[in-house]
Structure formats: structure tokens, C-alpha cells
Image (cartoon, grey):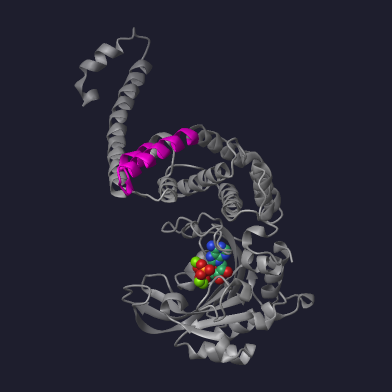
Amino acid sequence: MQTAEIRQRWLDFFAERGHTVVPSASLVSDDPSLLFTVAGMVPFVPYLTGVVPAPYPRATSVQKCIRTNDIEEVGKTPRHGTFFQMNGNFSFGDYFKEGAITAAWELLTTSEAEGGYGFDPKDLWVTVYEDDDEAREIWKRVAGLPDERIQGLGKDTNYWHTGQPGPAGPCSEIFFDRGPEYGIDGGPATDDDRYVEIWNLVFMQYLIADVKSKVDFTIVKELPKKNIDTGMGLERVAFIKQGVDNMYEIDQVRPVLDAAARLSGRRYGADHEDDVRMRVIADHIRSSLMLMSDGVTPSNEGRGYILRRLLRRSIRAMRLLGVEGPTFRELFAASRDAMKAAYPEVATSYTQIEQLALGEEATFLRTLTAGTAILDTAVAKTKADGAAELAGDTAFLLHDTYGFPIELTLEMAEEAGLAVDRPAFDTLMADQRSRAKADAKSKKKVLADLSVYSDFRARGETVFTGYTDLVTDSSVLG
Ligand code: ATP
Ligand code: MG
Ligand code: MG
Ligand code: MG
């Protein structure tokens, strides 16, 4: 089943059950406290918290998401993308636990011929919050799951809140068992490689306060209007349904992986390290494409910095695959072709995206070789000195002159078995920032001078005496 089909079945299923279909919001979230949209619920937060009355009692969406905190997992686990799509169904004070569980089970286990995803119930496991007897009872009744396939877990995994006083509640998650060749028997509580989490159901049930940590807070009261927020990983269901090993091999991603293999002349599946690199490239190129089509451009801070990091990480991964020259033209075109059916904007704004990507690639390729040589020398010297940490000024030089995001230096040092003197790097960065500030101030002065100069000139057809006049005018310099 193609990804587009899984997506459409989702939307049809929930639309038929009274949900308003809401298009994906941008990856750049409206919420200033969030760099990116990290979950399907993000655009619905005002309705879920009750700040704004929901315009509909039920909604469904397939939301584009970026999770930068998963970057280290990419390519190593089968299931973590920096970009992915979260299918969601939401109830704003309408149906609750029973409705959410019943719908999830029905969609997953209805046969493909009848519009469902056709999962075999014996491959599915669920977790519930350990004290949520209500959810456990519903699962038993609705799904006919035996007790041992419903695992009770603690607040660290099966409780949702934002970290702020507000709505909160237990979660119940659904997992797919990939079989004994992927790990030990024992359910999702013991093994998250064999048992892949596909769907999270959040039951917003309480108002909480005194939030001290993920697991330490006080329940104030039961909410008068309880909400449902669920998220199913589209790529996760896709890789299972497509019978492939991981999310980087699905129809929307695999063409980029194949392009990386072709360009490097290496075969996917021949070497574990190379495979991870190809998966990283496939993921990061797609994420970059999607970010740029939502208007993010590479820069040294905020969202643009994340994009830059993804792009530079891809370039380095290609280099580790033995390719020294540019590859973005082919890689981005492959990703565009795989994504444009679902997101036509990646094709319509492609000229601009490509230009940005190629520019970034050219810049980084110019400094990557030199920077890598500097790093290698510094690593060798550090080791010869018997030290365990790369000096902060090396990391700073790499950042400042060679455009190495600090995370890249950390990664490369770690591969060589070294840490980095991060506090020293941070101090150098802070010094640079205050120097830049001071610089900006003095530049302002120059601008002031120039504006006075142009005002002066605009006054009329006088012989220009501005320089001498101006420098004697202390108010201008002041
Ligand atoms: P995991 O434990 O596997 O990291 P999660 O518990 O962090 O997943 P949730 O926050 O519950 O994930 O998100 C809801 C659903 O979105 C998950 O059940 C999963 O199917 C999907 N999902 C989450 N993170 C990713 C990701 N990085 N790449 C692809 N799908 C994801
Ligand atoms: Mg996670
Ligand atoms: Mg999880
Ligand atoms: Mg989860």
C-alpha cells in the first residue's frame, strides 16, 4: 500500500465518522515557543486548551512534522525521521476513550478490501497508563485483546502534558510486532525495535498544576470537556504495509536513498555504516526540501540553522560514501519527484529551493575539505598529547571559518573517540557575539554619518564641503 493510499484511507475513514478534514499547517509553527510543528495537535492547541472554542467537535489531519530531537536516531532506528507526517484525529469535548479506541482498532484491523489497513490483530500490542483501568477495560472489550497484550506503563512514557499547568492525561499506544527476528519476546515494554510504536492516543482528562517534572505534578480536577488527540506515524505504517525494513525504504523516501547509492557507486545493503549514511541522506534531503518549501532558508540561527545542519550533515554523509563533488542536484530532484504528488508546492517552488540548496552545497564543499584536514590534525595532536578533549578554539575555528555547525564537530570528534571542550567553545562564541554587537553599534554611527551627508547634499547645489564640515560637527560623531 502506497503512502498516498494510507493517507487517503485515513482521511476518508475519519471524514465518514463526522471529522472535519483540516489541511496540514506549515512546518513553521505559529507558536513562537516552538521552532517547528512537532505533532499533529500543534495547530489545534488553542481548541484543546479551551483558549479558543473549537469550530468543529471533531477534526482530522495529516500534519507535516519536524522533530530535531530525533536527528541522532535517524538511519539507526527503523522509525525516526527528522521530517515525518502524523495522521491525527481529534475530539474537542466530543467522543472520548471509547470512541478513540474503537476507531483506532477498526481502522487498523478492517481488511484492506474494506478500506482499512488490514493488520492482523495478533501482531498488535497496546500500552496503557498503569492506573488507567478504564482504558484497559475498553481495549479488552472492544479489541478482545488478552490482558498480557495490554501492558501498563508509568508516567514517563504513558502520560501527556505540556510541562505547564493545563490539560493533561493518560496515553495509550499501539505497537506492531515485527517478529522474533527483530528482538526478544516480551512486548513493547521491553523492546522498541521489535515492537514498533505506530499510534499514540492521548486522553486529555485532567487539569494539572504544580508541574515539577514529566512525572511530578498535581491533578487539580477532572476536565468538564475532555479531549482526544491522537497521532499515527504515516511513514511507520507505510514501512510495515510495504513490507520493507524501515521508513527510509518507503515509496516517498527510497528514491533519494537509491540516488545516494547510485551517485556513490555503493550498494545499499552491503555495509551497515554505509546503509546508515544513505538513510541519513534520504531523510535529511527530504526534510530540507520540505522546510524550504515552507519558506525556511539556511542561516546561522533558529530554523535556518537547523536547515543548514541538515544540509551540511547530508553533504558530509555523501563524502563519507566517497563522493567529493556536488550531488544535491540529483538528490533534491529525486526527493521532489517522490513528494510532489502529496505536496505540489515542492514542485512549484522548486527553482528557488534548488538554487538555495545548490548555493549551500557549493559554499560548504569549498570549506569541507580544508576543515576536515584541520580537524584531523587537531584530533591527532590531541591524542598525541594524551588529552580526551578537542580544544574549544579548534571547534570555534571550524565553525567560524569553515562553516562547521558545532554539532558536526561534536559528531566528528566523537567518531575519533574525543569529546570537545564545549564551555571554551561557548565562551568564544559569546565573545564573538558581543564583538559583533559592538561592531553593529559603530556601524550605526557610520550610517548616521552617511545620512547626514546625504541630507546635507540634498540641501542644494553647494560645493561639497561635507567631509570637513561634518567631522567638525561633534553632534554627528557623538
Ligand atoms: P518513539 O517512542 O518511537 O520515539 P514517540 O513516542 O516519540 O515515538 P509520539 O510523540 O507519541 O512519538 O508521536 C505520535 C506518533 O508519531 C508515534 O506513535 C509515531 O508513529 C510517530 N512518530 C513520532 N516520532 C516520529 C519520527 N521521528 N519519525 C516518524 N514517525 C514518528
Ligand atoms: Mg520519540
Ligand atoms: Mg514512544
Ligand atoms: Mg508515543
In the image, residue 381 lies at what x, y percent? 34, 39
Decide: is 478 above or below 407: above
Q: Quadrant of the N terminus?
A: bottom right
Residue drawn 33% across the image and 26% down it? 447
Residue drawn 38% across the image and 10% down it? 461
Decide: is 302 above or below 222: above
Decide: is 263 above or below 127: above
Q: Quadrant of the C terminus?
A: top left
Farthest residue toward the right?
A: 113
Is most of the magenta stretch helix, strand or loop?
Answer: helix
Indicate yes or no whether the magenta region holds residue 383: yes
Decide: is 115 above or below 474: below
User: Is residue 413 shown left or right of residue 88?
Assistant: left
In the image, residue 343 lies at what x, y percent? 66, 54
Asked where in the image residue 248 lies, by quadrant, the reply is bottom right
The front one of 113 and 405 is: 405
Residue 40 seen in this snapshot: no
Indicate yes or no whether the magenta region holds residue 392: yes
User: Is residue 70 shown left or right of residue 164?
Assistant: right
In the image, residue 350 lies at what x, y percent? 65, 43
Q: Which residues are magenta?
A: 368-397
Residue 265 seen in this snapshot: yes
Q: How many marks are shown on the rendered structure?
A: 0
Residue drawn 30% across the image and 38% down it? 432
The front one of 290 and 413 is: 413
User: Is residue 384 shown left or right of residue 368?
Assistant: left
In the image, residue 88 lies at what x, y percent? 59, 70
Farthest residue toward the top?
A: 463
Asked where in the image residue 117 lies, by quadrant, the reply is bottom right
